[in-house]
Image (tube, helix red, strand yellow):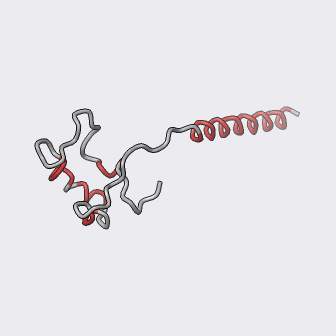
Amino acid sequence: MAPKKNTLLYNLLFLLVCGGLFLFLWNAPPETTAHLPQDENHARFIPMGKKAAEKFCNDCHGPDMIAPLPKDHPPKYRCLFCHKRPNQRM
């Protein structure tokens, strides 16, 4: 009887962990990061790969540039990790 009891215990533990993960993810906050703008300034970066496009971000968003980033902005080397392209899904 011991192996059957252990199997039931492991199955219940597995279901509890899966249920906990599901509830945790279900209650996650909504996405708040702005997507890459769909304008003429950013249009050429949409078809590029992420790493290739990110090389150009500092041209306009670096310090003392056209559109500088706020002081409390996270690391500036992975822009498209957070700022999704318009055709990109989560």
Q: Is residue 76 left or right of residue 19?
A: left
Q: Is residue 9 left or right of residue 42?
A: right
Residue at the image point whose x is 29% and y is 37% from the top: 74
Residue drawn at 71 percent across, 34 percent down: 13
90 shown above or below 45: above
Q: Position of residue 62 (x, y in %)?
A: 16, 45
**Would residue 7 appear left or right of 78 to someone viewing this image?**
right
Left or right: 13 as drawn, with respect to 90: right
Asked if residue 3 is positioned above or below residue 67 in the image, the reply reads: above
* Residue 77 x/y as whole percent: 25, 46
Q: Position of residue 49 (x, y in %)?
A: 31, 62
Q: Quadrant of residue 43?
A: bottom left
Q: Nearer the viewer, residue 16 or 64?
A: 64
Name the residue at the front extreme: 39
Residue 38 percent across, percent down from the top left: 32, 61
What is the quadrant of residue 4 in the picture? top right
Q: How many marks?
A: 0
As drawn, which residue projects farthest toward the right?
1
Which of 33/3 is in front? 33
Identified at 75% across, 36% down, the residue is 12
Residue most toward the left?
Answer: 64
Residue at the (58%, 36%) spot, across then down:
24
Q: Viewer-proximal residue, 30 or 20? A: 30
Question: Quadrant of the image for the N terminus?
Answer: top right
